[in-house]
Amino acid sequence: MTYFTVFSGPTGDEPPTVHTRDFGITDSKGRKLGARASTRDLCLTVAEYQDYGDRGSPRLGKAKEHGVEWLRTGTPDGPCFTLHVAATRDGADFGASQPCRHFRTRAERDAALERYFRDAAKRAAKGRK
């Protein structure tokens, strides 16, 4: 299995950009329905897996202490644009977590972001009481 080490920008410590939408709809409990998405522009570099004492789990433990985030994506070296989404209630994440998605271009990622917000608003309106 191939692993990648992830760097964001030149230093690897830039925070994600957070996008939020309030759909102007409330649920039966009076909570505002909306969505949140976070995006990052990364550069992936192939790296060998190193055991940082995290018992074989590359996403946990001491790897994070060394500033390394491991992905099992099969994506080659180069630019990578991520998208992580969540439904919100009163501005707080709500419901099941969603996997982070990876795109080769910013345009593909931004189109997926707009699609997610559009489809989430439709689902929110459909489920409204």
Image: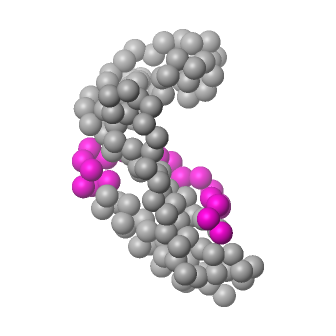
Q: Is residue 95 magenta?
A: yes
Can you tell which quarter of the image residue 109 is in? bottom left
Residue that sits furthest to the bottom in the current view: 129
Residue at 45% across, 45% down = 16
> Relative to 71, is 15 above or below?
below
Q: Is residue 15 above or below residue 46?
A: below
- Is there any visible trace of residue 114 in the rendered image? yes
Q: Position of residue 60 (x, y in %)?
A: 61, 26
Q: Is residue 36 above or below residue 43?
A: below
Q: Along the horizontal axis of the image, is 51 left or right of 104? A: right
- Which portion, as a residue range, is magenta? 90-109
Task: Tell me the quarter of the picture where residue 89 sits.
Answer: bottom right
Can residue 6 be spotted in the picture? no
- The residue drawn where x is 48% and y is 79% is 122
Q: Residue furthest right?
A: 29
Specify the quadrant of the image occupied by residue 62: top right
Q: Toward the viewer: 122 or 11?
A: 11
Q: Which quadrant is the N terminus positioned in?
A: top left
| Residue 92 image point, x, y percent | 64, 61
Q: Does the magenta-highlighted stretch encompass residue 52?
A: no
Residue closest to the eye, 106 or 76: 106
